[in-house]
Image (spheres, rainbow, N blue to C red):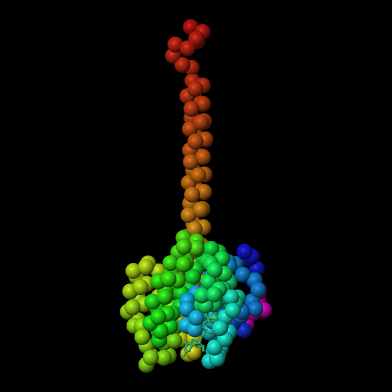
Amino acid sequence: MSDTNDSTTTAKSSETTKSDKENGFDFKYEILPEEHTSFDLSFKLIVIGDSGVGKSCLTINAVKNIFDDSYNATVGFEFFTFNVKINDKVIKLQIWDTCGQELYRSLITNFYRNSSLAIMVYSIISKESFEDIDMWLRELRTHSNPDAKVFLIGNKIDLEDQRQVTKEMGEKFCKENKLSLFMESSAKTGVNSQKIFIQAAKMLFDDYNNYQKKVENSGQKQNNNQQEKQKQKITNKRIDNKPRKNQGGCC
Ligand code: GTP
Ligand code: MG
C-alpha cells in the first residue's frame, strides 16, 4: 500500500469523474488511466468462465475501452490493471484474466487462493456456458479464500435475438448461491463493462474500511480493558494499604 498521489494522470482522467445516480452509483468515482502507478489500496481479482464467453473482451473493454471482434483464445492467463479513485482513495485492481480451456484448469486454481474477488462470466447466448457456472463455482469454493466475493456476469447482451439464458435465470442463481452481484453486460457495446470493476473496487474498499473499523474498535476495547485493569490494580492497592482490622496493629 502507498499513500502518494500522482497528479500527472488526474488531468486526463478528470473527464471520467462521476457521481452518477443515473449509473446506479451513489458514490463519486474517477477512472484513472491503466498506467497510473500510485495507489492507496490494491486487490487481486480473477475472471473465470467457459472459453469464448467474452472474459478477455470484457476485461479489455473495461480497461482500454476497445473491442475486437476476432477471437484470440487466452493461453493460460493475462494480466490487466484497472485503477479507480473512490472517495479520494486510489484503488488498483490487479486482474487475472484466465483461459476457459480445460487443459489449463489446474494452472488457474493457483490464482483462486490469492484473489479477493472472482468474476464468473457466462454468455447469454450459450446455455451450456451458464450450466457450467455451477462447476466454476464449485472449483472456486474448493480453492479460494472463503471470504472471497463472487460476481456473476451474463455477457453478450447485444445479441438479444440469440438469447438462451434469461436474466431471471442469472438472478436466481446469484440469489440461491449467495453471490455478491449479478449483472448482464456487453463487451461489444460496453454496457456495464466498467461498472463491474467499479462495483468490485467499491465492495472491496467498503470491506477494507469495515475491517479497519473493527480492528480500531477492538484495539479501543483492549485499551479500555487494560485501563480498567490498571484502575482495579490501583484501587486494590489502595484497599490493601488501608490498615486492616485485627491485623497486627500497634494496639
Ligand atoms: P478464452 O480466452 O478462450 O477463455 O475466451 P474468452 O472468454 O476470453 O472470450 P473472448 O473475450 O476472447 O471472446 C470470444 C469471442 O466472443 C470473440 O470473438 C469476441 O469478439 C466475442 N465477444 C466477446 N464479448 C462479446 C460481446 O459482448 N458481444 C459480442 N457480440 N461478441 C462478444
Ligand atoms: Mg480470453
Q: Residue at x 51, y 57 (%)?
A: 212
* Looking at the image, residue 8 lies above or below residue 43: below
Ligand 2 quadrant?
Answer: bottom right
Quarter assignment of residue 245: top left
The answer to whether residue 100 shows anywhere in this view is yes
Label total for image: 0
Indicate the position of residue 3 as horizontal and vertical percent values: 63, 65
Q: Is residue 147 magenta?
A: no
Residue at the spot 61% in from the left edge and 80% down from the top edge: 33
Residue 209 appears in view: no
The N terminus sits in image quarter: bottom right
10 drawn magenta? yes
Query: In the rendering, at what x and y percent does residue 206 appear?
Result: 48, 65
Q: Is residue 233 left or right of residue 152?
A: right
Viewer-closest of 159 and 65: 159
**Magenta residues?**
6-11
Which secondary structure is most common in the magenta stretch?
Answer: helix
Q: Position of residue 180 (x, y in %)?
A: 41, 69
Along the viewing direction, whichever of 69 and 60 lies nearer the viewer = 69
Which residue is found at the position 41% from the left and 91% from the top? 159
Classify residue 155 as left or right of residue 86. left
Residue at 49%, 58% (x, y): give it: 211
